Amino acid sequence: MNIKNQKIKGKSTGKYLRLSPDKVRRILNQIRGKKCNEALLILEFMPYKPCKTIKKILQSAIHNTTKNYKHDKSKLIISETFANSGPQLKRFQPRAQGRAFSIHKPTCHITIKVQTL
């Protein structure tokens, strides 16, 4: 089997990130299937908080693939992206007359997989 015909894959994961999985998925849907250089530009100019974290994870996936398999960065596309929910941090907000309201602070795990064209 010729190695030139194989699609080389690399991946990177960020775990226990203090971001909402639903808000992260909204951004991941925008970059899925794009070339890596194009996706980095999109993430740089989007006005959302998770973009900075997603950009770091994407750069890590690109670096893993280019260093381990000696492939050019310009020939990589984002093949798979997903955000799974992690454990929720549970806090209580004191309210009037001795009551307490619960606050759930979500966390997520982001996985980005890249492959050659």
Image (cartoon, rainbow, N blue to C red):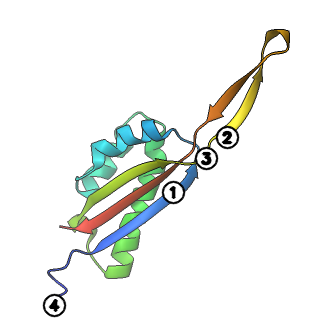
Question: Disc 3 designates what residue?
Answer: 87
Mark 3 or 4 closer to N-term? Answer: 4
- Does the residue at mark 3 contact the one at mark 1 (Cβ under 8 Å)? no
Q: Nearer the viewer, mark 3 or mark 1?
A: 3
What's the amino acid at mark 4?
Met
**Helix, strand or loop under label 4:** loop
CA separation in Å, label 3 and label 2: 7 Å
Q: Quadrant of residue 37?
A: bottom left
Percent position (x, y) of residue 25? 39, 42
Residue at left 70%, top 36%?
Answer: 90
Any mark on residue 1, and which?
4
User: Mark 3 or mark 1, which has the lower sequence index?
Assistant: 1
Q: Position of residue 100 (x, y in %)?
A: 77, 20
Mark 2 or mark 1: whose residue is earlier in sequence? 1
Cα distance between the residues tagged 4 and 1: 33 Å
Q: CB of mark 3 within 8 Å of CB of mark 4? A: no
Q: Secondary structure at mark 1?
A: strand
Note whether 20 is above or below 32 in the view shown.
above
Residue 90 as seen in the image, left or right of residue 46:
right
Q: Residues within 10 Å of mark 1 (few under 14, many from 20)?
A: some
